[in-house]
Image (cartoon, rainbow, N blue to C red):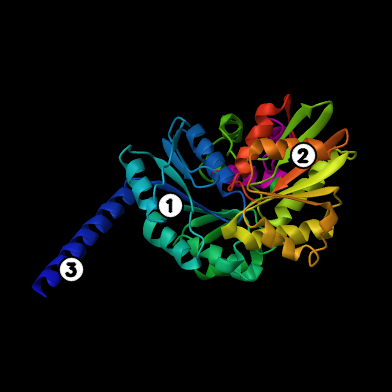
Amino acid sequence: MIVILFLTLIFLVLGALEFRSHQHNLRSIPIRVHINGTRGKSSVTRLIAATLRAGGYKTFAKVTGTLPRIIDDKGLEVPILRPHGANIIEQTKILRYMARRKPDAMVMECMAVFPEYQWICEHRMIKASIGVITNCRPDHLREMGPSLENITRSLLNTLPDKGVVFTAERKMFSLMKAEADKRGVQLIQVNPEDVPEEAMLHFDHLEHRENVAIALGIAKHLNIPTAKALASMHACHPDPGALRLYTAQHEGKNVRFINALAANDPESTLTIWEKVLAIYPDPGSVLIMLNTRADRFDRSLQLLEMVGNNIKYDFFISIGEKTKMLSQYYHRYNIDPRKVVELGLTTQETIYHKIFELVSQQGIVLAMGNMGAGGLGVAYHFRDQGKQKEKISG
């Protein structure tokens, strides 16, 4: 019994010392930006970090998206190794790493999905001086749903105490504003139309105007010149999941591969497809490639429904995990089983050659779903095999 009490006392003391050390680390970094939202968190984190560097702030950032990274004050990237998987405790370790380098600012992407963990990430781990909620869209329904209101309220757990928050959200803004006012938080809604078209043309990938608008809103808040902020954003590395279009040729056939794997939610994916179709109104054979992950099966069903209701296609290719289970939902979501090509977990080369086999002379592939479970590898295979990289202007 005495031993148990002694060990308990030791753990309590160690916990108190760890908490005190973490609070000291927080106070040592004057500007703390915490990024939450449904879509675009990694891209916005990169853009804001670039903006702060342009303003002369020594800035470190952390992204948790396609490939987790620390971005240092020079814009260089350090991989984050996760031998035991992702855990929100990682945030305190990363913050300690940053604090040792005495930055003026840090930008952290929220890595929590469950509402209570989002609250902990903000109110115990980050305590942001500037918050961001990129947008509120249907995703992670099991953890935050089932309704868009539920998702919005979950994201609002990262409103900083009496801080300032930037958002590009439109549909749920009134709810966000009411909650922000209740908590004494200043909520600023940015307008994507304020970002000039010319500024968007300088990105070598499809960057969303809403993301740039949020970064420019923070630039204005910190008195960083717009021209400086944009130049730094144009020069920064995009997330590996950033939307790109690769063109590849094989045996006299031409295929455009649209890497929309990181979009995830139906609304964003459909918007991308409509934009691409406007640029290429005569695409040839249309192939939808859905990459499924076992732990994101509900997301796959949402995308399945979106395709069945909105996109005309010649072939529907299913790759990744649980593709056989996916087939049970084809009739429910208006997917024609005769057009389905189920490949499951297979090699990048197999998928590549199958796509060219299905295309007549030219075609376009809309790759959606998830970067994991082999999705990123397929995108990189088309990138490496492609003769050129095309740009989709935003």
Which residue is identified by label 1? 85
Indicate the quadrant containing the N terminus: top left, top right, bottom left or bottom right.
Answer: bottom left
Which residue is identified by label 3? 8
Where is residue 180? Give x, y as percent.
Answer: 54, 65
Q: CA distance from mark 3 to mark 1?
A: 27 Å
Residue at the extreme top of the image, as rendered: 387
Indicate the quadrant containing the C terminus: top left, top right, bottom left or bottom right.
Answer: top right
Mark 1 or mark 2, whichever is nearer to me: 2
Magenta residues span: 193-218
Closest to the observer, 254 or 356: 356
- Placement of 184 over or under 38, stated as above or below: below
| Mark earlier in primary sequence (1, 2) | 1
Where is residue 59? Give x, y as percent.
Answer: 43, 38
Q: Is residue 197 left or right of residue 78?
A: right
Q: CA distance from mark 1 to mark 2?
A: 33 Å
Q: Are marks 3 and 2 in contact (CB under 8 Å)?
A: no
Disc 3 marks a residue whose amino acid type is Thr
Which residue is identified by label 2? 355
